[in-house]
Amino acid sequence: MTDDRMHVVNFSGGLCSFWAAVRVAEKYGTSDLTLLFADTLIEDEELYEFNQQASEFLGVPITRISIGLTPWELFRQHGLIGNSRFPICSVYLKREPLDAWHLANCLDTVQEQQVRLFDLDARRPATLYLGFDWTKEKRLIDLRQELPTWQIEAPMQWAPTWDKCRMEREAVAIGIRIPRLYTLGFPHNNCGGRCVRAGISHFVHLYRVLPERFYEWEREEQVTRRDLESRGIVPFSILKDRRGGQYNHLWLEDLRKRIDAGEKFARDEWGGCGCAGATREVVQIEQ
């Protein structure tokens, strides 16, 4: 089945966005399919390998975009360490570059007739596809509310719905190698297993299975903290210490020391990756 629309998949380098792209290709073909990947520059090496496998399987090149900053470079530039309340890396490194590409290349559903009426723009109508599975229906609703003129779909919410285990099995069956972050127990394949929206359980797991990456982020947090303090800025930490009903900073260095001391932590405080979703809950540092 083909039509005259562009089909743009926000391609994260994860299983859900891969299978979303496969479903779009099966329904509409690949001649107008774009795999749009926003690179944070801290991705795991196997994400790029996975992207290459996906590209070869679909016969569609990866369209890579990047603003040329890592999250920590962004944090120092904006004077704020990202966290679950202020995930500015999600906004500036993912959401805004993706939206900017879409606006530069695609028509939204309201402007389409207006632009064509005056023949002012050669952009084409397009549908945006996201790797949201059936557990993220609310995120799709929120994004549609935030961008009411855009046509947005989540193919992995179409029937039949699959869980991550099914996605992994089906990928193996077609010869796609599962990225190591999944096999190491991480819930997503983004940012090299790190995320400012992640909870304590996630970072405890990171320390245990990829300690060198934990140490890297511990050092980056310390460097950025000192940089902000030298500029008269009171820094936030990524994590919060909620012991005793109080909310205090929990620096990664302190978390590591508590882990080394044998402290036990909750196993269900994973947080979640929310890149490419709605941004209305994000407070911009400039405001």
Image (cartoon, rainbow, N blue to C red):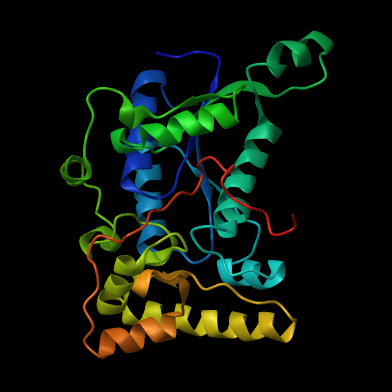
Instruction: Quarter of the image for the C terminus: give it.
Output: bottom right
- Up/down of 148 relative to 113, above or below: below
| Residue in the image at 29% along x and 55% along y | 187
Q: Position of residue 140 (x, y in %)?
A: 44, 32
Is 262 positioned to the left or the right of 63 in the image?
Answer: left
**Viewer-proximal residue among 148 and 261:** 261
User: In the figure, residue 134 lies in which quadrant?
Assistant: top left
Is 228 positioned to the left or the right of 261 in the image?
Answer: right
- Up/down of 122 relative to 101, above or below: above
**Viewer-proximal residue among 36 and 259:** 259
* One can see residue 154 in this view: yes
* One can see residue 31 in this view: no
| Residue in the image at 62% along x and 21% along y | 149
**Viewer-proximal residue among 79 and 115:** 79
Instruction: Quarter of the image for the N terminus: give it.
Output: top left
**Viewer-proximal residue among 195 and 235:** 235
| Residue in the image at 27% along x and 89% along y | 260
